[in-house]
Amino acid sequence: MSELTNLGVKDIRDGVARGDFTAREVAESFNAAVEEASALNAFIVTTPDHALAAADRVDADRATGKDLGVMAGVPIGMKDLFCTHGVQTTAASRILEGFEPQYESTVSSNLWVAGAGMLGKLNMDQFAMGSSNETSHSGNVVSPWRRNDGGNTPMSPGGSSGGSSAVVAGRIAPAATGTDTGGSIRQPAAFAGIVGVKPTYGRCSRWGIVAFASSLDQAGPMARSVEDCAVMLGAMAGFDPKDSTSLDMPVPDWAGGLDANLAGKKVGIPREYVMEGTDQAILDSWERGKEWLRDAGAEIVDISLPHTKYALPAYYIVAPAEASSNLARYDGVRYGLRDLPDGAGLQDMYAQTRETGFGDEVKRRVLIGTYVLSAGFYDAYYNQAQKVRALVARDFEQAWAECDLILAPTTPTASFPLGDKSDDPLAMYLNDVFAVPASLAGLPAMSVPAMLNGDGLPLGLQLVGKPFDEQGVLNAGLAIEQRAGFEAQPEKWW
Amino acid sequence: MSRYTIHGATGEWEVVIGLEVHAQVTSNAKLFSGASTEFGAEPNTQVSLVDAAMPGMLPVPNRECIRQAVRTGMAIEARINKWSRFDRKNYFYADLPQGYQISQLYHPLVGEGQVLLEKDEKAGIPEDKVIGIERIHVEQDAGKLMHDQHPTMSYVDLNRCGVALMEIVSKADMRSPAEAGAYVRKLRSILRYVGSCDGNMEQGSMRADVNVSVRRPGEGLGTRTETKNVNSVRFVMAVIEGEARRQVDLIEDGGTVVQETRLYDPDRNETRSMRSKEDAHDYRYFPDPDLLPLELEDDFLEECRASLPELPDAKRKRYIEELGLSEYNASVLTAEVETFARFEMLLAETARQLDKAEPKVATQVANWLMSVAPGVIKGLGDDVDLGHNTAEAQAVILQMQGAGEVSGGQAKEIYEIVLKTGRDPGEIADTEGLKQQSDTGAIETAIDGVLAANADKVEEYKGGKDKLFGFFVGQTMKAMQGKANPQVVNQILKTKLS
């Protein structure tokens, strides 16, 4: 049955529906793959029973002729940022160790209703803060990919959705959920040679997702094909009255609407994205991307996004500011870790709990955020960053007068060895330089695999679309996917 | 006009007062969650996942709370901001699960408005005065800590956590404890008319932060202190008196007032320092990214306005101008929702029974409600069953009195019996002999007897001693055992004596 783990979302669903195999057989195959993959450290907890129970329900429904959901029989990985009923949810932080929510996030709930099951909770950067999956309290996730130098240097799966990218690339799960605040779906997807979609801000409900930066956080699918992502995004998205920022719009049939013919479409190439420090291979992949899109019928146009260089600094003010406030609730009073030294008072309990419970990167961002919101600094930092954010968004609005989509690299480099940048936060932050502008503007964006670099590591191309135009983004992604013919997959070493 | 001043050792001082009143919004659910707001439930039984700030929980504004705040703003003639926004006020405390309070700093829901204090010399308001309102914003209440449940730990009750408050910020327009007291009473009255807050200060539904500073008359503002969470009109006034005196003494002794937050201790009637400006929290306010700006549509605003009842100032004006009540009566009757409701119900019922227009009976009804009825009730003490005190029964009494069937004294007697027994007033008048005689024949007979027996006095009267008319009336009433209709007696007497 091991070939079942090579199947993606749509093939599993259709195979189950046709009766080629049962959902239980699928779940058992992936449960076995999960069990074998402990060397990747991609899961914080595994939930084989959840996957089996969901599979059994699908098999029973099929047996009685009931309608099956769009994810029926597909076991997936769930990023540990999503609260899952009765299943420990930690955001990869010690401060939430042992926390079992008595509620289910809207997005995960939507997926279960669509017939998916859960293989386990995926490791990630702590509170989604990181770009290499090295800030988790549960340890680093190791990428299934290795360089083609014959060595065994452990590589980064990207972050913060590093567990998600690792399991999908390693055929340990056909798909996984991710969340993207400043590139946390797209960057790990690029590092792992898979597809990752960040929809328009508000498409997926944030209810039940541990908050990092509320105005930026957005859930999305990670899978090995554009079509699988389209199917899964359709299951995840939808208006949720419990989230005030949720989009009250119908969810289009993205999978049904896929069309790789881009005739009449204009694709913008932002000149400011040509940056120093970008790998030549990345620039090469970008050139190929243009050719592929041209081949699909699109016209390639030069555009300008003049405030691009200010986006990353603005992001590293806005996101930590929101995080510093969002993370105030982890105080040792009601749930999770409580570190109460003998004879300590309330303030000591706060200090000790947060000292023990938060990792270094989380503390760094809470401190940055607290600083930029402080009296006397608010205008110079937070307010200024908000103005920059508005300018970045305006750049895109003006660009839409000239193009329908934007093509850019997802990252300035391919995956790097674990530990390479962990002592240099700025170098790490630069990894998201191409991803952050679309986050600040709330735009739909995706990463789709393009090619391998000289080290045999995947490179991704990023597509950014107009608000609510996930379809346009997915269609262009499909056009690239069809032409790139990216078939590479990591050799199993675990 | 007597201006309120503090007499210091070195001269007169003026007091400058501004109030921030926190009023709990009347609504079934909390500001951002569906949990109940009912007072007095078992601890932590009215707490939603949002209120407890569980991971991933999000606030969703409760439309009814916004509506109540908008209606309140309209009731104080304030500008309603069609675009407002919620901000987070960040600080750590165990009664604040989120680690921040959702409030409105930068863009409040309601802008400038005003509250009128009517002239009331007895209450220390020598002339009408308008108190400016700076703003009203909407925010979450915190939970409650209980320190007496465990020897070394504090317990937290989150029932109140997340309940909607309106913070009504006045301008520093008040100059005496009396004005501040009148302002709080007036505000409370408006809130209760509107139905946006029950005004129950004992249960904490309304509490005030009192800002006080002193200055030499005509000089610039002094440094203010803020005394937090004062929960009665009396305490507000006491805080101002005490705090103004403390500041004057301090300055005259060569000290300086420091800007600080103070707490009031009602048992000792004094305030004490809670924290100075230097220790003040840096609340790191910023727009709440979980919430979109609040944008109000015209339809919503129109509905809010249409739902407003007649408000105290308008009602008072109408009572004076249309019902012909005295200013004093109108003020008293319109001060409280219960009072005007009782008045208007009795007025309508009485007018209906007498088949007269309301203005014709308004003064009679007002006098009854304000002096006659309370006097009777007070006199009866514990014998009263207020369940019998219905508008219908009182209207029947007023109708009988208005039609001349019973005298004022008889009306009181009937009312006493009604309050004790609940019997029907008409039946009481009949069976207890509490009706006055309007039969002209009987009265004429009695008058003839009185005049015959006092022929000398009749002569004196006719000779110009007008005062004797009262004597004849008294004698006639006596002869009729007090049951004659005095108007009829007067009329017949006049005819016979002319």
Image: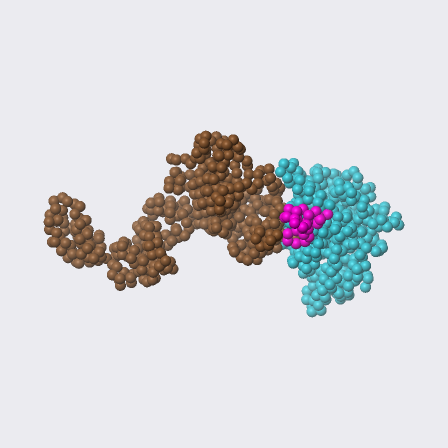
Chain colours: A cyan, B brown
What's the magenta bit mostly, secondary-structure-wise?
A: loop
In this rendering, is residue B459 above or below B429? above
Please say whether residue A352 is one of the residues in the magenta stretch.
Answer: yes
Furthest toward the right, the residue is: A150
Q: Quadrant of the N terminus of chain A?
A: bottom right
Q: Answer with the quarter of the image where residue A115 lies.
A: bottom right
Q: Nearer the viewer, residue B277 or B255?
A: B255
The residue at the point 55 percent across, 52 percent down is: B160
Please say whether residue A281 is one of the residues in the magenta stretch.
Answer: no
The residue at the point 51 percent across, 53 percent down is: B27
Q: Nearer the viewer, residue A131 or A90?
A: A90
Q: Left or right: B307 with respect to B360? A: right
In this rendering, is residue A56 above or below B22? below
Name the spot of residue B290 as percent of width and height, x first: 62, 48
Q: Is residue B470 visible?
A: yes
Part of the protein shown in magenta = A330-359
Name the spot of residue A331 as percent of width and height, x first: 65, 49
Name the spot of residue B452 as percent of width and height, x first: 11, 54
The residue at the point 55 percent across, 38 percent down is: B260
Q: Nearer the viewer, residue B262 or B393?
A: B262
Q: Quadrant of the C terminus of chain A?
A: bottom right
Name the spot of residue A445 as percent of width and height, x first: 71, 48
Q: Nearer the viewer, residue B433 or B334?
A: B433
